[in-house]
Image (tube, rainbow, N blue to C red):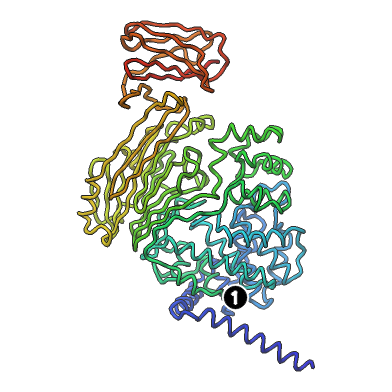
Amino acid sequence: MRTLYTVVQTALLLSVIILQHFTASANPEFEARRQQYMQDAILRPNSDDVVTIQAYKGVPVDQNLLTAMLNNIPTRSTVDFDIVKLIRVLFLSNGEYDSQILPVLEPIPFWLTPGENQREYWSENHMIMWMSSDWLLHEKYGKAIDSTLERRLRHYLRLKNQYGFYEFYSSTYLPYCFSGLVNLADFAQDAEIKSLATQASQKILQELLLLTNDRGSYFPAAGRNYYGKYETPFLQNHNHLIYLLTGRGTKPTTASHAGGFLATTTIDVQPIIDSYSSSINTVVSMGHTLLEGIRNINNNMTFNDRVIFQWSSGGYFHPDVAQNTFQFVKVYNMWDHFQFNDFRQFSVLPTELATAAANIASPISKGSVISGQDVAIYKHKTVTLSSTQDLWKGKKGYQLIPVVANTGTTAVMTASGKVIPNWDERPSLDANTHLPYVQQKDNVALVMYRPDKGLSLFNIKDDKLDVSLFYKPEAMDEIREYGNWWIAREGDGYVAVRRYCMDMVNNIPACKQPDGQTWVIMVGHLDTHGSFDAFVQTIEQSKYEERWYFDLPTLQWIYFAKVVVDGKTLQYAWNGDIFSGPTQTATAIQNNRTESNALTVFPNPANDHISLVLADNYKNAQLQIVNSIGNVVYRDEINGFTGQIKTISTGEWAAGMYMLMLESDGVLYTQSVVKQ
């Protein structure tokens, strides 16, 4: 009986090995690239990313690299990036390194504990790296786990398979989500977890290929990304995945983190490879709304896990979740964590005031949410254009990259914030000081910037509101200009950007208008537009319109822009309240022309009175003053001459913001005033 059991056990083991080999070798081109990749990595072990390949191939793991990794485990803030590699070594090496690795991992908390101010457990990639490592150590070595791990791990995997990834199209974080998922896909004993992780691993790689162009470069609009990922087209972590799957891009000669995982996995890559298409024109709905997550999707979790899941979708201090976050951060004593720097000033408030505080802070509290939006994607061979549609316009943007074009090997995009010549030096967590409204139709995007006036309360003003254009001029074969249009060609790929202005700031194309700016981005290709000359002619035939106007019935300032180009019309009227108008405040109601002479009011801020200096000769001009909720507090008819001063008592007015509106001969002059 014992002999029969041994024979059956051996046969099953052999069948698993054969199946794994068959899966990895099903695509001969992929298999050839995979084998060469591992061979090159072993020959050039210049980083600890090679340890997963060494363990897989049965080559002794480099002790210097392994020791350095283990020494960094207690202090590294992103230690989970190393732990997933160590887990892979443990499972691929038949216990050879258990005595070195397990004692180092034993004291590390694999989930959030009170007082944490260094590590991160809640963003999507960190969650799966921590949870998958914890679960696999539990299955293989009997590691004690907390009571909620299994439920939240299954929930996470189902969530990703149903709704996709919150950190959508992120060349920074997507590869690390993959490494956490593929460890489960390869090594989990639980059949459901293994199956769900396999599906999610394939899904995330298909997402990567969706915006990869025929050159193998990947420059997407993305949730939570870094600008450094847009400066180099090849040989970054995500490029290793692209090369292994498609053969596109520059051939790596050393391993990367994610490349080591893909080269040593047995998941079926054929559906991923088959998903690649050279031409795409679609809109993808990503994730779910924040309220859906709160009310339905995550409502079966414990309070602590529910908060962490809402954080993973960017729901930190959004008013809908602020009270939960305040309560959680206070209990866990996390106000010193870098993720909460922007909101530390509110830490002294009682938890019950969190929602009110978050509403006051809405210019910075809402823009971190990265779930529940539409992403427009256009790709034709070497060119791509992608953008998030109408997502948190005017709010602070954190790591969201809202719109990007790619001409082949260079990204072309706009960004708000202080103009810094080296884009790598832009703040990593504040990719945009204010997000644009973006509307994309096929290969054209209308990009409008209008910063929320409340940003100034958080010291986001002046040059922090500039808008810059990023591209690599050395990558272009030809550059032309037509009016405000900048037009370039890289090989067969074309791009045109209508700049708001033609200024340069710190040697970067940038504009300093703090009220509102409109840019337009368009891509084309030899196949779709003919020669570059023909593409330029299309731009020359375009029409552009932009204006501010005041809607008197609703007391709203409207910023309007419209572009007609390449057979497409994109337009948007951006409504704002009475205090969100342009700095230049005299605007004609009837014909929307702008006047240069403004209304002068002093003192401002005011105490018991204000004085108006009339800037023109007025006859039967109507003066109204309204408070912040639109109630008229003063009304009069003005008959006067240039230079005359009119004094108005403000002693009985409540403290706050007021708007003066003087209408004369079809022109509306406005001026905001603060009453102390």
**Residue closer to the observer: 462 or 441:** 441
Task: Identify the residue under disc 1.
Answer: 55
Say which residue appears at 69% left-offset and 42% top-offset.
Answer: 324
Q: Residue furthest right?
A: 1
Find residue 513 and report its image quarter: top left
Say which quadrant the C terminus sits in.
Answer: top right
Query: Where residue 259 appears, x then y in whole percent?
Result: 51, 68
Q: Residue 72, can we see it?
A: no
Q: Residue 96, can we see it?
A: yes
Query: Where residue 330 appears, x then y in whole percent?
Result: 71, 40
Residue 488, placed above or below residue 417: below
Q: Is residue 286 left or right of residue 136?
A: left
* Amino acid carrying mark 1 in the image: Ala
Q: Is residue 283 left or right of residue 197?
A: left
Residue 458, placed above or below residue 440: above
Q: Is residue 567 left or right of residue 450?
A: left
Query: Where residue 296 appears, x then y in whole percent?
Result: 66, 51
Q: Secondary structure at mark 1?
A: helix
Say which quadrant the N terminus sits in.
Answer: bottom right
**Residue closer to the observer: 209 or 465:** 209
Residue 97, placed above or below residue 660: below
**Residue closer to the observer: 559 or 114:** 559
